[in-house]
Every structure is written in C-alpha cells, then in structure tokens.
Amino acid sequence: MQVDAAGNVSSALDYVRHGVVFANRRPHLVILDMIAKLAWFALTVAIFGVAGAWYASGVQLTNNNVLALQSGAPTLVALTLIQSVITNGSALVETFAVAAVLCFGSWVLLEAFVRGGLLPLTDRTFVRDAAEHFLRYLWVGLIRRTTLGLGTLLAALIALGPLLTTPMAEWGQIWPDVRWAALAGLGILVLLAFGLMTVETLMRSDAMEVLGLDLYRVVGIVLVLALVEAGVVLGVLAASALVMHWLGSPGGLLIVGVLLTSVLSVNHSYMLLVRYSAVGLMHLDIRYGAAAEHASDL
C-alpha cells in the first residue's frame, strides 16, 4: 500500500480490503490455526476423560447401587447415577474444576505460541516468530481475558444482584425491574470487549503508536471486521436453526452442530488473520511513511 499524492494513507476500508487479499493468499495460516484448535479440542476431551475416570474411581457404591446398575433398567440406572452424583457432588465439582483450569491454561499457552507464529507480518519462519512473540502474546492475552472476566463478573453482580437474593421461583417477578440494567450491562461488556480486542491487536502487533497517530482509522478497521464477523455468525446461526427445525432427528442435530461449530471456527480464524494483516499493513505504512518524511527533511 502506498501513500497517495495528498500525503494521506488509504482509508480503513482499503486496509480491510488489502487484509482480505493478504489472508486469501495465505490459506495455510487459517489451516494451521484450525489444526491448533483441533489439537486443543482433542486434549480437552482427553483431560475430561481422565477427570471422569478419576472421579468414577473414587465413588463409593453400596450393594443396592451395584444391583441397580446391574439390572440394566434405564430408569433405575439413571436414578442411581443421579443419586451418586449428588452424594459425591463436592468431589465432582473439584475434579472437573481442575480439569477446566487445565484446559483453559493449555489453550492460553497454545494460542499464544501458534498465533505468535502466524499473525506477525514478517519474513521469518513460523517457529522463529512463535518463539520471539510467545511471551508478548501470552501476557497480553491473559490481561484481556482477566479484564473481560472481571468486567463480566462485576456487571453481572450489579445488574443481576437482586436475582441472587431472591428464590428462583420469584425470578419472573423480579426480572422486569432488572432487565434494563441487564441490557445496559450487556452493552457495556460489548464495548469493553471491543476496546480490549483493539488494544490486544495493537499490542500483539507492536503497533501501539498507531493508536495515537490514527485512532479513528484503527477503530474503523477493527469495527468493520467485527461487524462482518458478527453478521456471518448471525447468518450461520439462523440457517442452522432452520436446518435443525427441518431435520428434527438427534443424528441430524449432531451433524448440524458439528458443521456449525466448524464454519464458525474457520470464520473466526480467517477474520483474525484479516484483522492482524490490515492493522499490520497500516502500521508499516505509518512507520515507513514517517521514516521517508524524516529522510526528506534531512
């Protein structure tokens, strides 16, 4: 991308267009990101499988429980399993809480390494980029997730606090009094998530100076791509709902669910690459434009 005759860089939509061209020429980067997601999914299944086996090995069954399970009667077996889960509820929560923390930690580490190698605009190899950018991608990602998590918790406590002190049977009566506060909290969370996504993109791209030099264009790039991704998500969800209503069978619902998850995951990886490419190209234009201007002054 070049600076035009008036000395202004291309508009935000032009950067988005060039980001799309960049992403279309590098589909292998989207494929690598999808492979990382699939690897993490397999690891998650393994972790929860081990957690379930560990939990089951510690459950103490009475003779009546054993007889009920051996009977093979679906209703009796289901009631026995539910009773066992209730009796050993604390162990279940602790075991699967540990599994959830392990899955979350593994994704944070894997995401920082893989995307640290995929997203920067350099001519180095994936491994060299991943090693160089891993720590930056890691701590920036942790800050974003922690901030958004704390913001979500705070907004939920403020907006939905009355529901926590009211019996569940009375929530229908309380909801009209808290719905506007809940909508306001949701709007604040959307703005917070957008702001964190913008700052995260700039920090991971080592382009924070762009925020001060051209705030509106940066926000425009991220906003356009966020709206496009949201539109794709809503369109896919609506189409999936129609297909699921048409199929109706459990097998069909499972297939649609898998396809829906796959399409949304590919879309997210692609839009992520477009966003970082567009912001990275803008950063390069500003950096080299400033360097050229400084050289001409000399």
Image (tube, grey):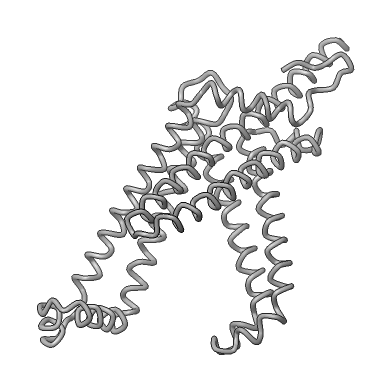
Rendered residue at 18%/70% (across/down):
57
**Residue 35 higher or lower than 149, as above or below:** above
**Residue 98 higher or lower than 256, as above or below:** below
Residue 101 placement (x, y as % from top left)? 41, 60
* 106 relative to 159 in the view: left or right: left
Rendered residue at 68%/26% (across/down):
17
Residue 126 placement (x, y as % from top left)? 45, 26
* 201 relative to 5 in the view: left or right: left
**Residue at the outermost front position:** 246
Quadrant hosting residue 39: top left
Using the image as rendered, state which of residue 60 and residue 15 is in the foreground. 15
Residue 202 placement (x, y as % from top left)? 67, 38
Rendered residue at 66%/24% (across/down):
18
**Residue 192 higher or lower than 270, as above or below:** below
Quadrant hosting residue 16: top right
Rendered residue at 78%/18% (across/down):
289
Quadrant hosting residue 188: bottom right
Image quarter hosting the N terminus:
top right
**Residue 185 higher or lower than 148, as above or below:** below
Circle count: 0
* 93 relative to 186 in the view: left or right: left
Image quarter hosting the C terminus:
top right
Using the image as rendered, state which of residue 293 and residue 63 is in the foreground. 63
Residue 82 placement (x, y as % from top left)? 28, 80
